[in-house]
Image (cartoon, rainbow, N blue to C red):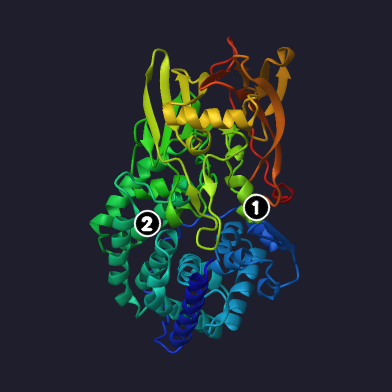
Amino acid sequence: MSQSERLSARYSRFLNRLAARRAAFGAHATTFVSQPEPRTIGSFARGKQLSAGNLVFAGHLVQAPDTNLWDIDPPDTAFENETHGFAWLDDLAAAGDVPARARAQDWLWRWITLYGAGRGPGWTPDLTGRRLIRWINHAIFLLMGRDQDQSDAFYRSIAQQTLFLGRRWRATAPGLPRFEALTGLVYAGLSLEGMEDHVEPAANALARECGLQIDAHGGIPTRNPEELLEVFTLLTWAAVALSESGRSPANAHWSAIERIGPTLRTLRHADGGLARFHGGGRGLEGRLDSALAASGVKGRTPDGLSMGFARLSAGRSSLIVDAATPPGGKASSNAHASTLAFELTSGRRPVVVNCGPGAHLGADWRRAGRATPSHSTLVLDGQSSSRLGTGPQKHDLLTDIPRDVRIEVSQAPDGLRFEGSHDGYRKHYGLTHVRKLEMTFDGRGIAGEDMLLALDESGQRRFDKTLDATKLQGITFDIRFHLHPDVDAAVDMGGTTVSLALKSGEIWIFRSDGSGRLHLEPSVYLEKTRLKPRSTQQIVLSGRVTETSSRTRWSLAKPEGSPVGIRDLQADALSISGMN
């Protein structure tokens, strides 16, 4: 972060604190005039963990069964932000028993005592919006059994936060943070006595943000599928709340919902989870289904390009490819060097994946997860196809990215075909990566081809210079296929094939044309809900480029005669140990 950015952040914190203190002397709500139907979805298992004092936030586990949440020294800012956002109320409400309610009530009224007068770190517009949504959603759960003084304190605090949001929502960064702040303001304005004057300005601002942040195809600048889901969820909650109060959401608001819904369906794998690209995970369990149902938006875009991703789907299989230039500028702060990487899912079982986002595990894992070798694509000379910037102005941003990404999705003789190329390696090596993928009509077979080509004279000169530096030994490449941890992989047939056994009982066979060395290597699977990386494996095809044109063919298919469909009813285990 540059000096000017640090000064700006410090000034913004000062203004937030000032607005929070001023709000403490504003009008007080005394009751709800209406209450939106609770739409947030929590995890029963996580709620039970919280009740037992196993606190998991932002990749940290704190075991404190007899300690109030606000008496714990937060290990980092991300942990602190998650606690002050109160999304954990969804989980305690999902558990819904007496210990869960007692825990929720103790933590909430302790927060009011410590921070309710505008003190503390939780006073940012996006965290306040997130917090208001949860307090309003779960008010009945929270107020049950509380005396008049505690109820008064609750309403006083919720009114103060509303006044704060009304003054400071413009200070949030465009995108998800601003959508959170404005949705919280809409909720509070609709629900609280004396706060209705906030509804129209907030709803109008929300509509303007939809026009600015949601493109014509239902995408967002970060190209993060999970973030798109969060935005869609907030817009749907706000639209339903407005409709239930007898108000009509603006046309731009509804239009954004109608554009995003089909895009999310396109980015959804056969198992119901989202494709994991550009810092996004699979999405909270049940959130996508709930948001789509609430929106009423049907259908998805045809197989083709959505938010820069191409999808091939047939039978029980789905394959999603990152088929566009990475996000640029500030939108690239969490972006990955994943151009032409793909994920494959068969039925309920992910097969080929990307390693995923590692931000919750620290700076080193975050950086590693963003690199091309952590994705299922070709890696040239161990380098990423996009590179992170250096220096305070460009730290964490992608600055050296593919500029020319070309794709075509078409019919193949026996299925669907994807063809794509990117120039991310051209500047340094003179080579363009070309990838072809074909899926059979029944979804039981994938044929792939990866090429490295010098397409013009300048590319050939650059390649020759790089080749000379290797003393004509060639430039190394690796084509990586990261496997989900539940896939059991074994090298067969004297090292010419790899068999993949899924927990459903399905078998897939990986083969190559023999132009590269086929082997298995260790890999990791990074999940936001786990405290440590999960060990897994990756298939790697390794070789050297010695000419201006190289080609490697491979396939991934079910054996002939294997069942067309398998009843896959095995439930995934949920336990506290699963968080480790």
Residue 76 pos. (x, y %) = 65, 66
* Amino acid bearing label 2: Leu
* Amino acid bearing label 1: Ala
Quick one: label 1, few (<14), some, or many (20+) residues within 10 Å?
some
In the image, taking residue 68 as reference, residue 226 lies left or right, namely left
Where 180 falls versus 284 (above or below)? below
Q: Which residue is mark 1?
A: 45
Residue 449 is tagged as none
- Quarter of the view holding residue 75: bottom right
Q: Is residue 237 visible?
A: yes
The front one of 363 and 558 is: 363
Q: Which residue is mark 2?
A: 235
Residue 493 pos. (x, y %) = 71, 12
Q: Is residue 36 visible?
A: no
What SS does tag 1 mark?
helix
Residue 187 pos. (x, y %) = 39, 67
The front one of 120 and 334 is: 334
Residue drawn at x 37%, y 27% as measured from the top left: 408
In the image, taking residue 541 as reference, residue 411 lies left or right, namely left
Where 576 falls versus 473 (above or below)? below
Residue 348 pos. (x, y %) = 56, 32
What SS does tag 2 mark?
helix
Question: What distance separates the C-alpha of mark 1 from that of mark 2?
Answer: 27 Å
> Does label 1 or label 2 sit earlier along the sequence?
1
CB atoms of marks 1 and 2 within 8 Å:
no
In the image, taking residue 201 as reference, residue 159 lies left or right, namely right
Residue drawn at x 48%, y 35% as measured from the top left: 426
